[in-house]
Structure formats: structure tokens, C-alpha cells
Image (cartoon, rainbow, N blue to C red):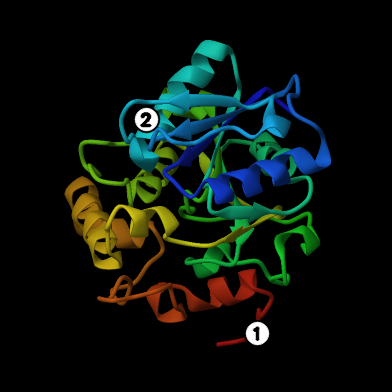
């Protein structure tokens, strides 16, 4: 595995951070020569458990949010000589062999960013078979080329970051909702690929941090739409493979009617003949 810098943005809920660290240490004890794990403690109250001695704890003194943590990780990883950055929400649980499987997808020709498949918001990123719990996931040697991917559990090539630039904190000034879509569109415009790998799977509890800081789903929807409209105008939906039905008010997840090519999404999910 290439040298990898893995950052976990955390804001409260220490039991969740403990759980995802246990998942990371389950396959091979930390620290590892090729993996540097850092908890970015945006609330300033997390205490590393004794068994996680190989993990670094960074207290930022402010809430960098997801987007700020990502850009901080890009710069720190560059200074450390890493080749890849993984961003991992603390409200997640991981399949076995998660990090090598996720980072391995960056080895594909021209891949800028890779995300794990999951049980969450975007249909084009859903696992074909969602397990009862993450550790039971059966990996598949399948890589999907997609227009964009979710920032919940995501690996960036630092070579691509150097070319494409950091996430846009000015356009997405709150948590960073929509910045993952924007970065993927920018990477693809520069000739890079964006992929989802079925070799790695993540279960996402969803909105734990957002609930703690008082943000509502409609606030996040507004950040996505306002930011993407500002960056791309009307064409971002087409570039993202979405139709006019995407992001209706009070949505809780994407549906087939969000996509411009429904047959493509059904094919990803193992239903190639469905219409």
C-alpha cells in the first residue's frame, strides 16, 4: 500500500471514534509504516484510549469542520511525504481490510479519488449486497467509474490534489456539503477519473455530528445547491449525471428519478435489464 495519511474528523461522540479506531486496528495493529492515523479533534474533548497508542491526536483549537479537516490533511500529508489521504467520518463502521482495499483503487490508471461502497445516500455508491454489519461484507473486485462520490469514506491521490487544488472553503463555507461533488467535477474536467470500489464497504450512521451542532438536513441541502450553482451554474447537474428531479426539499436519500440515466444506476446495482 502506498504511504497513506488517514484523518478522522471528530466532534464529540467519543464512543464512535473509539469504534472506528477498533475497526482500523482489527486487521493489523497500529502504528504501521505505511499508514499514519490521526484523529482531528474539532471539539477538543477526545481522549485516546490506551490501546490506540499508535494513533495521533490533534486538537485544532477550533472546529475545522469536514472540509477544513480535509484541506488540513492534504497539507500535513504532503509535508509527511504521503502519497494518499483518506478521510473517514467517525460515525462509520468498516469492512475487513478496509484501508488497503480503498487506497488500492487509487492504483487504477488516472484515478484521482476513490470512495468505498456503502449503505447510504447515493444510489450509484450503494453496495450491491448490504450486509447486516460491516465486518460481514464480502468484497468484490469491482471498480465503478462515477461522476462524483461521497466524502464519508474517501481516498485522494495527493498527485491529483496537487493538480486540482484543495476543497473550496469559500464556496462551501459551512460543513462542506457539496464540496466533494465540486472537487470530483474539477478533477474530471482535468482528465482524472473518479471511482467507487466494491472491495471496501462502510456502514454510515449519518448526521451524528450535524445533529450535535444543530444543523438540519435542509441547511445542508442549501449549502450543496447554493455552492454548486455558484461554481458551475446550471450545468453541474448534467456534469454530475443528475436530472432536474435531484435534491427535492426534505429528501433523505437519492432515488432513481434523481439520475439522468436510470439504466446505468440499475446496472451498477446488478439489475441491468430493469427499466
Label 1 Cα crowd, 10 Å radius (few <14 / some 14-19 / many 20+): few
Q: Relative to the observer, which residue lies in front, 64 or 82?
A: 64
Q: Residue furthest bottom?
A: 275
Q: Is residue 164 above or below residue 221?
A: above
Q: Relative to the observer, which residue lies in front, 152 or 271?
A: 152
Q: Secondary structure at mark 2?
A: loop
Q: Residue at x 34, y 45 (%)?
A: 179
Q: Quadrant of residue 72?
A: top left
Q: Relative to the observer, which residue lies in front, 266 or 200?
A: 200
Q: Relative to the observer, which residue lies in front, 238 or 222?
A: 222
Q: Quickly name the residue at label 2.
A: 166
Q: Residue at x 46, y 53 (%)?
A: 148
Judge left or right: residue 269 versus residue 176: right
Q: Residue at x 51, y 16 (%)?
A: 78
State how far apart marks 2 and 1 are (Cα): 40 Å
Q: Is residue 176 above or below residue 81?
A: below
Q: Is residue 216 above or below residue 59?
A: below
The numbered dot on residue 149 is: none
Residue 153, given in percent of the width and then of the height, sits at: 56, 48
Q: Quickly name the residue at label 1.
A: 273
Query: Looking at the rendering, in which quadrant would you find the C terminus?
Result: bottom right
From the image, state whether disc 2 or disc 1 is nearer to you.
Answer: 2
Q: Are marks 2 and 1 in contact (CB under 8 Å)?
A: no
Q: Secondary structure at mark 1?
A: loop
Amino acid at each position: 500500500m502506498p504511504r497513506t495519511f488517514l484523518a478522522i474528523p471528530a466532534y464529540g461522540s467519543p464512543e464512535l471514534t473509539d469504534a472506528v479506531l477498533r475497526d482500523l486496528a482489527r486487521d493489523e495493529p497500529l502504528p504501521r509504516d505505511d499508514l499514519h492515523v490521526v484523529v482531528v479533534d474539532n471539539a477538543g474533548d477526545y481522549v485516546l484510549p490506551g490501546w490506540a497508542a499508535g494513533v495521533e491526536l490533534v486538537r485544532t483549537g477550533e472546529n475545522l469542520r469536514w472540509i477544513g479537516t480535509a484541506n488540513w490533511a492534504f497539507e500535513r500529508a504532503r509535508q509527511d511525504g504521503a502519497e494518499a489521504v483518506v478521510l473517514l467520518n467517525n460515525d462509520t463502521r468498516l469492512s475487513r481490510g478496509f484501508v488497503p482495499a480503498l487506497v488500492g483503487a487509487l492504483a487504477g490508471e488516472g484515478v484521482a479519488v476513490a470512495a468505498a461502497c456503502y449503505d447510504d445516500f447515493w444510489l450509484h455508491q450503494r453496495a450491491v449486497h448490504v450486509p447486516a454489519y460491516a465486518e460481514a461484507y464480502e468484497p468484490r473486485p469491482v471498480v465503478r467509474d462515477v461522476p462524483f462520490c461521497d466524502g464519508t469514506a474517501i481516498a485522494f491521490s495527493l498527485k491529483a490534489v496537487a493538480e486540482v487544488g484543495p476543497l473550496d472553503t469559500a464556496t462551501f463555507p459551512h460543513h462542506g456539503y457539496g464540496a466533494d461533488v465540486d472537487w470530483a467535477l474539477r478533477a474530471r474536467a482535468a482528465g482524472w477519473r473518479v471511482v467507487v470500489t466494491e472491495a471496501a464497504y462502510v456502514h454510515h450512521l449519518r448526521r451524528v455530528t450535524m445533529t450535535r451542532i444543530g444543523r438540519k438536513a435542509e441547511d445542508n441541502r442549501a449549502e450543496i445547491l447554493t455552492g454548486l450553482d455558484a461554481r458551475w451554474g446550471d450545468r453541474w447537474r448534467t456534469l454530475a449525471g443528475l436530472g432536474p428531479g435531484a435534491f427535492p426539499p426534505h429528501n433523505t436519500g437519492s432515488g432513481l428519478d434523481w439520475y439522468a440515466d436510470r439504466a446505468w444506476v440499475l446496472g451498477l446495482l446488478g439489475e441491468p435489464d430493469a427499466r
